[in-house]
Image: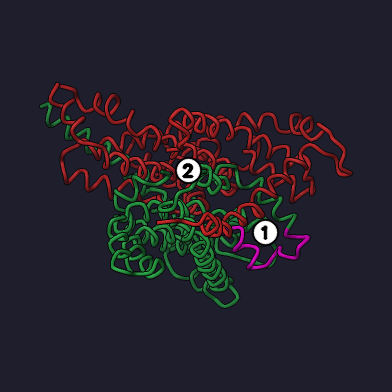
Amino acid sequence: MIIFLKRVSTALVFGIMAFAIFGPLLNLLFWAFAERWYFPYKLPIKYGFKYWELVFHPRGGAMESLGTSLGIAIATVVVCLLVSLPVGYALARRSLPVRSLTMLIFLLPQAFPSLAVYMNIARIFYEMGLNGTITGVVLVHTVHGLVYSVWITTAAFSSVDHSLELAARNLGAPPLYTFLTVTLPQALPGVIASSIFVFLESLDEFTGTFFVGVPDINTLPLLLYSSSMGGNYQVASITALILLVPSIAFMLMVDKFFKADVLSKIGK
Amino acid sequence: MTESRWVTLLMLLPASLLVLVLFLLPLGYSLVSAFTTKDGSLTFDNFLKSYELYSVDVFYTIFIVGVSTLLIGLFSLSIGGYITLCGNPKLVAIMRWLYRWPLFIPFIVAAQCMRTFLAKNGLMNNTLVTTGLLEPLQTVSFLDWRGIIFAFTWKQTAFATLLITGAMASLDQSGIHAARNLGANRFQILIQIITPQITSTLTVALILSCVTMMSVLSVPLIIGAGTPTMLTADMAFRINSYGDYGVANALGFISYALTGTFAWIYLRKGMQEGGKPT
């Protein structure tokens, strides 16, 4: 009897959790394919692709926003990697008197509520002519992504066995060669994981783009926002679905990149 | 091997410059703007005006972020504990698969999901009515503070749990085995053996969640329309409708102060542990 009760309660907990997690997503899915749906009907009256055609129509704006979003996200990853690989390596391997302080510097942009900073960046960018430009948006996304790229690459480099590098150096390999052939390949899963974080942060970023990108840069989150506020649930849900695809794909793969040994070193 | 200090500095330079120009500079700008008038003289008017107009919203924000942080901590510890201690590989696999779905879902997508899911005629109420748990007339819309808390908790629990299960997985298992041998049940092991060892990870996860929630604009805009609302929505409104940087930055200062309190606790703890923010 007790075993039966235990099973029932386990099933109940899993069921409630699954409903809480998948319910909102399911509702989004319904809206993306609903052509007609109103009260008191519990499910859409008519399903179809009418709104998909509307969204993907050249004048629908989604394709353009998708292109802008992807371009910005890729540029953000590249800039983040360029500046944070050296930092990650330095923090993991070189002696630094102010190591923990350095780690904290890159946490700062995420340790303060970013909105209050973004509105002032927008003001500064406005004077520099960077408002409403891709460069401006990429820069804002980069600063926000640095904590992921620096901390995770540091953890990734720390988890590489130092003796292998020393062995390579003993055999006469120059430092850069050692880094490229011994250290980097072993740290690669972590580096890729950090890039995924940065990519997704950028792709999903709304607030910074909202302040810095207007009026010329229209990313997917901005399109989603304007259609949601305009009461067009179908267009908003379809845009949301497009944003969901990379998010869920990366979520399912995250274990491949995040080994426990790297994960446990983050922030150390 | 000898190391040049200069090379190390050079490695750190580009990233540090980015933080300096794109974070510290605008941060300083916002602090100055909060305490000065348009012509640059010192004033507290911005704060007085913020207090008059938005004091309710400050408490509303503290309440929402506080409750959400608490729930995130509770859920992520429970899920992490379950995964570490359950012992049934099938259930653990299901739980691992289940909890992480919201992990990378953007806040704005989460907000849009909740906007439909938690509405009066949304899927949640419809399901409760269909299963007979609720009468059709009893349904209410959850698109207020409850919706915001739901959205925040939904999204950030996955993040916190990912970090926490990682930390739990790398713990020394012998302590857990010893406790089990001495007759401790799972709950005791989670609270007395595991949690104390992963407090630093838990703190990091909660602080990051807290700051994230204080920064998110889309969720209060999409879910919690009307008054009271969260500080982020107020700041955006101040800027977009009035171009009033003074009050907006005063509100910004208040939100720094709120999260700063958390960060201070974190830093102080780090100092106690020898200056290392672990």
Quarter of the image where the C terminus of chain A is located: top left
Task: Categorize mark 1 by other alpha carbons within 10 Å: few (<14), some (14-19), many (20+).
Answer: many
Q: Is residue A132 visible?
A: yes
Of tags 2 and 1, the one toward the viewer is 1
> In this rendering, would A138 be left or right of A131?
left
Q: x and y percent of residue B75 in the render?
A: 36, 35
Q: CA distance from mark 2 to mark 1?
A: 25 Å
- Chain B on-screen colour: red
Marks 2 & 1 on one chain: no
Identity of the residue drawn at 57% across and 70% down: A68
Residue A140 located within the stretch drawn in magenta: yes
Quarter of the image where the N terminus of chain A is located: top left
Amino acid of disc 1: Val
Which subunit holds the residue at mark 2?
A: B
> In this rendering, would A92 be left or right of A252?
right
Q: Is residue A36 visible?
A: no
- Label 1 sits on a secondary structure element that is helix
- Label 2 sits on a secondary structure element that is helix
Q: Which residue is mark 1?
A: A212
Identity of the residue drawn at 55% across and 57% down: B6
Q: Which residue is mark 2?
A: B151
Identity of the residue drawn at 55% across and 76% down: A57
- Chain A on-screen colour: green
Where does the magenta region start and end?
Answer: A125-142
